[in-house]
Image (cartoon, rainbow, N blue to C red):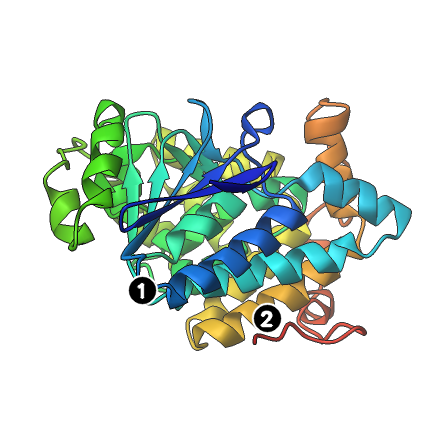
C-alpha cells in the first residue's frame, strides 16, 4: 500500500483501490489529494495488471462531501494562489476520470456533494447505498455547480438538470439512480464482498450486477411533470414565476429555497452556465467552469456564503446583489471571461 496521509492506494489482484482518508472532514478534497489521485489514475491506466479502479471514502458518514472550501476561503481572503491551483487540479482530475480507459467504480456510501460528485460522476460506475445523500449545493454558498456538472446537468431531460443545479436539492439512492448520478444501488452491507469480487473479476460490470438491488421508488419521479413546467423556462425570473403559479408543497419548498437560501448572482450565472453547456463538449465545458470559478472567487458572495454557512453558522448571508433584478446581463457575462492568469489546460 502506498499513501499520502489523506488518500491511500493499494492493489488487490486486478483491482486498484483509492481511499479518501479524511473521515473527520467528511473526506473533503484537498489540492494534494486531487493532484495525487490524478497522477495515480494515469499510472493505473498504463498498468496492465490493473483491470479496474475502485474509489471509496473512509468512515461511514461520507464518500466525499466536496472540496475543502474552508481552505479555499482562507486562501482567497489571504490572496494566496490556492484559489486557482485547487480548481485547476480538481478539474484536471475530473477530466482524467472522464477519459479513463478502464472501469472506474465509485462507492457513494454516505454524503456525496460537490467535489464528491466530480470524483464519481464521470466514471463508468457510481454505486449508491441506503446511506447515500447526493447534492450540488453550490448556489447556497455563492458558487455554481461545477466539477463537470454543468455538462452533465445540461443533458438531463425536462428541466431536471436546472432544478438540481439551481436548488441544490438532496437526493437519496433512488433519486440518484433516477437522475443518473448513480448507475447502481448496492446495500452497504454488500460493499466489502463487492470489492473482494471485483479484485478477482475480469468483467467489472457483470460482477457488479451480482450485487445490485432495487432502491425503491424515486420521489423525484413524482415531480417530473412539475419540474418540467417550472424549469423549462427561458430565464431565472420565469422559473420563479412558474414555481409561484404551481400548486403543492414541492413548488412552495423549491421557491423558498431559491429565494431565501441561494445567492441571486449564483442563480443567474448557474442558469446561464448549464444552458450554454448543452452545446459544449466536455473539455470546453471544463474550461468554461474554470473561468466561472475564478470569477466567483474574485467576488464577495462566496466568502459571505461560507461565512454564513460554515464559519459563523448564522445562515444569514448578505448577498450582493441582494436580488435577481440587480444581477445585470453584463454582470453575468463577465463571469465567462478568460482569467488574467490564463485558461485551464489539459496534458
Residue 150 lies, in percent from the top left, at: 48, 61
Front one among 241 and 296: 296
Question: For the residue labelled by badge 1, is the local secondary structure a helix, a strand or a loop?
Answer: loop
Q: Residues within 10 Å of mark 1 (few under 14, many from 20)?
A: few
Residue 255 lies, in percent from the top left, at: 49, 38
The C terminus sits in image quarter:
bottom right
Q: Is 338 situated left or right of 6 in this image?
A: right
Residue 82 lies, in percent from the top left, at: 77, 53
Viewer-nearest of labels 2 and 1?
1
Question: For the residue labelled by badge 2, is the local secondary structure a helix, a strand or a loop?
Answer: helix
Q: Is residue 199 visible?
A: yes
Residue at image point 74% right, 76% down: 342
* Picture layout, residue 18 above or below residue 292: above
Residue at image point 52% right, 52% down: 37
Query: Which residue is label 1 attached to?
Result: 48
Residue at image point 15% right, 55% down: 203
Query: Which residue is label 2 attached to?
Result: 288
Label 2 – label 1 distance at C-alpha: 34 Å
Q: Which mark is residue 279?
A: none
Q: Is 131 situated left or right of 219 in this image?
A: right
Q: Is 155 situated left or right of 34 in this image?
A: left
Q: Are marks 2 and 1 in contact (CB under 8 Å)?
A: no
Front one among 20 and 113: 20
Q: Is residue 150 visible?
A: no
Front one among 172 and 341: 341
* Picture layout, residue 280 above or below residue 303: below
Residue sitting at the far right = 78
Amino acid at each position: 500500500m502506498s499513501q499520502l496521509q489523506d488518500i491511500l492506494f493499494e492493489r488487490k489482484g486486478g483491482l486498484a483501490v483509492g481511499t479518501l482518508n479524511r473521515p473527520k472532514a467528511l473526506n473533503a478534497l484537498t489540492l494534494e489529494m486531487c493532484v495525487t489521485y490524478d497522477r495515480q489514475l494515469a499510472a493505473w491506466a498504463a498498468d496492465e495488471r490493473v483491470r479496474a479502479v475502485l474509489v471509496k471514502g473512509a468512515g461511514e458518514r461520507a464518500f466525499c462531501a466536496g472540496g475543502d472550501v474552508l481552505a479555499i476561503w482562507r486562501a482567497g481572503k489571504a490572496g494566496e494562489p490556492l484559489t486557482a491551483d485547487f480548481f485547476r487540479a480538481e478539474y484536471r482530475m475530473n477530466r482524467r476520470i472522464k477519459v479513463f480507459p478502464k472501469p472506474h467504480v465509485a462507492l457513494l456510501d454516505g454524503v456525496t456533494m460537490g467535489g464528491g460528485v466530480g470524483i464519481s460522476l464521470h466514471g463508468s460506475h457510481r454505486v449508491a447505498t441506503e446511506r447515500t445523500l447526493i447534492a450540488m449545493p453550490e448556489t447556497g454558498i455563492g458558487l455554481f455547480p461545477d466539477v463537470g456538472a454543468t455538462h452533465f446537468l445540461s443533458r438531463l431531460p425536462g428541466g431536471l438538470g436546472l432544478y438540481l443545479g439551481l436548488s441544490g436539492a438532496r437526493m437519496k439512492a433512488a433519486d440518484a439512480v433516477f437522475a443518473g448520478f448513480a448507475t447502481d444501488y448496492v446495500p452497504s452491507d454488500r460493499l466489502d464482498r463487492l470489492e473482494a469480487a471485483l479484485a478477482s473479476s475480469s468483467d467489472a460490470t457483470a460482477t457488479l450486477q451480482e450485487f445490485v438491488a432495487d432502491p425503491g421508488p424515486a420521489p423525484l419521479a413524482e415531480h417530473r411533470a412539475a419540474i418540467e413546467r417550472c424549469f423549462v423556462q427561458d430565464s431565472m425570473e420565469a422559473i420563479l414565476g412558474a414555481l409561484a403559479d404551481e400548486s403543492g408543497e414541492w413548488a412552495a419548498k423549491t421557491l423558498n429555497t431559491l429565494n431565501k437560501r441561494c445567492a441571486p448572482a449564483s442563480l443567474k450565472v448557474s442558469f446561464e452556465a448549464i444552458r450554454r453547456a448543452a452545446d459544449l463538449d466536455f473539455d470546453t465545458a471544463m474550461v468554461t467552469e474554470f473561468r466561472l470559478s475564478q470569477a466567483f472567487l474574485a467576488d464577495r458572495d462566496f466568502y459571505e456564503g461560507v461565512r454564513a454557512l460554515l464559519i459563523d453558522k448564522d445562515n444569514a448571508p448578505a448577498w450582493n446583489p441582494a436580488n435577481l433584478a440587480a444581477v445585470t446581463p453584463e454582470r453575468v457575462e463577465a463571469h465567462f471571461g478568460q482569467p488574467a492568469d490564463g485558461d485551464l489546460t489539459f496534458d
